[in-house]
Every structure is written in structure tokens, then in C-alpha cells.
Amino acid sequence: MLQVKSKQQIIEAICQHNRTAAREFLINFEERALENYLERLTTLQGHRGRTSIWVRPSDSRAITA
């Protein structure tokens, strides 16, 4: 079942995974970007190795300036 979270809930979850993340910084990002970052953080905590994969979302640029 898909759990819908508010922007504040997503930020709180990010801060639980990344204790150095500042809420004041995260609030500036769009909700979808925060969801992508949270997904990446939770993926990193899972199984790692040759069978572990992560695919960058198609709407996300690889390099930003």
C-alpha cells in the first residue's frame, strides 16, 4: 500500500536517515525532489552489492550546476 506523506513528513524522514540534513535547507526543495532523495537514502540502507541497483529517475538530471 502506498503511503502518502506531507512535505514535512518527508523532511522528518530524511532527517532520520541523514542527521546532518538541515530542515531549513530541505524546505527549499520541491516535494518530488525530497521524495526522490528519501527513496535514495532508504535504498542505500538496504542490500548492497552486485545485485543491488538504483536507477536515476528520468526527470532528474545527472549533473547540475
Image (spheres, helix red, strand yellow):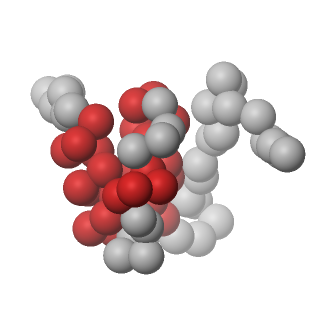
Q: Is residue 45 visible?
A: no
Residue displayed at 59% across by 48% down: 54
**x, y percentage for residue 14?**
34, 58
Q: Which residue is at the far front? A: 24
Residue sitting farthest toward the bottom: 20
Which residue is found at the position 62% from the left and 31% from the top? 57
Quadrant containing the C terminus in the rendered view: top right
Asked if residue 1 can be seen in this view, the reply is yes
Q: Residue furthest top?
A: 59
Residue 15, located in which quarter of the rendered image?
bottom left
Above or below — where is 41 with respect to 45? above
Lateral position of residue 56 relative to residue 8, left or right: right
Q: Position of residue 28 (x, y in %)?
A: 48, 41
Q: Nearer the viewer, residue 5 or 46?
A: 5
- In the image, what residue occupies the spot 41% across and 65% down? 22
Quarter of the image that includes the N terminus: top left
Image coords of residue 17 (percent x, y): 34, 68
Q: Nearer the viewer, residue 25 or 43?
A: 25
The number of callouts visible is 0
Instruction: Pick whichever, 63 or 22, lies toward us.
Output: 22
- Residue depicted at 44% across the width and 51% down the height: 26
